[in-house]
Image (cartoon, rainbow, N blue to C red):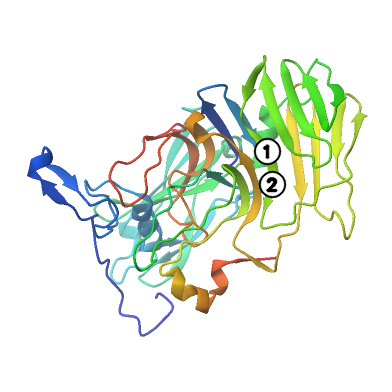
Amino acid sequence: MWHNPLSAGGFLWDFADQGIVRKDLHDSLDTDHHRGADGIVGPHHEKEGSFFTIKEIWSPVHMERREITPAFDGILHIENRYAFTNLNQCTFSARLAGPATNRTDSFAITAPDIAPFEKGRLQLQLPANWNSYDVLYVTASDKDKRELFTWSFPVVRPVQVTQRNIDTVGKSEVFFKEADSLWIVSVNNMQLTFNKYKGLLKNVSNKGRTIPFNNGPILQEGENNFAGFSHHYEGKNLIISSAFDRKQSYNTLQWIIYPSGIVKMTVHYFPAAYFTTFAGVNFSFPESDMVTVDYMGDGPYRVWKNRLKGTRFGVWHKDYNNTETGELELPGIQRILR
Amino acid sequence: MYWCDFNTSQQSFRVYTENESLFLRLFTPAWKTDQWHNYEPLFPAGDISFMQGISSIVPKPSEMKQLVRWDSKHIL
């Protein structure tokens, strides 16, 4: 739309999920499940994923993508998509946060003089220790101080977070034994069982109690041809790995079990075709056992390949829910990293 | 995701990744459709997935099958 000179704009068809008030059911809203027209916000004006997607896509302040590296100079490239407002009438602020839950540092950003339809720079005056935080948030507000959007820029990479949180050394020993078609590995109070032909994780237990996360990795839209498994120790680490064969087992799987009880899985795979709907691996877990998840990453709403905008990076808490966007009752979601 | 704590009714566990832009998939919503097959999202098999490529949400997938939009799929 933005790139077409003939485009006159558009409008959002339906603001809220449509429902009728049921006098016979304590004045509750009835959307007839998913059949009521689907709006941008819920029937009670709950903000769902699409709300934030729209906020980002149609924000009159457009932020160019930026990868934050240690060389980051505090410059973000922005574009004024207002028709009449100069960006110096807007307000910009930034906030650094993490890794500790309440560790945060906020600072203002001078609003740049950028005329309508022009591009320009946002210059952040970064504190000296900016690189010790996990994430940089930048918020733009309009001339009436209403927030337009908050963009997230992760400062840390997953590999750094993994390294600072995981102890792979440990004091325990990794024990290995074979039983029929199974390889049984024990370390600390944990026991892991692998299928020795397929390499799949079959069972995990801790202190004798099962963790029902198993039957994986299974490639989605890929040939599950892991084969030729062998095991050996490298130092105190136990390594279980498949053998690569150009024709028979070109996808490979490796497990490393560390004396600390940490288990690392590495999969190298080719998708099944040039075009695939998915790329990744699956595991089994009984849905009835899931209570909540806490995670670090973009969130908190469900995304699709063509619906990635509007998320925020952080640490999120989500209660188990099986709701569908567009129907009543939103799941419990909290932001943990402030 | 960077990491995820799975808090379960039995024992909890955490999964980390060193990969950037890894998608976490949790379970599958109950299948439903309408007479026009306008809303039929695709999910992977299994229950919990760690994905490098996820599916698109396509309005009117029945028509899209003929069209095959280049941006709805992942390219090797």
Residue A82's x, y, as percent? 32, 68
Q: Residue at x 41, y 81 (%)?
A: A4
Q: CA distance from mark 1 to mark 2?
A: 7 Å
Quadrant of the rendered image containing residue A83: bottom left
Residue at the image point whose x is 24% and y is 53% from the top: A144
Who is closer to the viewer here, A102 or A286?
A: A286
Q: Mark 1, residues whose alpha carbon is within 10 Å: few (<14), some, or many (≥20)?
A: some
Q: Is residue A14 left or right of residue A253?
A: left
Q: Tell me the residue at 37%/48% (across/down).
A: A324
Q: Where in the figure is residue A154, as x and y percent of width and height?
A: 56, 45
Q: Is residue B8 left or right of residue A335?
A: right
Tag 1–tag 2 contact (CB < 8 Å): yes
Dot 2 alpha-carbon crowd within 10 angstroms: few under 14, some 14 to 19, many 20 or more: many
Residue A201, located in which quarter of the rendered image? Answer: top right
Could you tell me residue A327's position as x and y percent? 30, 49
The chain identifier of the residue carrying mark 1 reads: A
Instruction: In this rendered view, identify the residue nearer to me: A171 or B8.
Output: B8
The quarter of the picture where residue A66 lies is bottom right
Q: Which mark, residue A218? A: 2
Where's the N terminus of chain A, which quadrant? bottom left
Question: Tag 1: residue type?
Answer: Asn
Mark 1, residue position: A215
B67 vs A188: above or below: below
Q: Which element is circle 2 on? A: strand
Q: Chain of mark 2?
A: A
User: Is A145 placed left or right of A4 in the picture?
Assistant: left
Residue type at mark 2? Ile
Residue A123: give x, y in percent of width and height.
49, 53
Vertical side of A50 occupied by B66: above or below = below
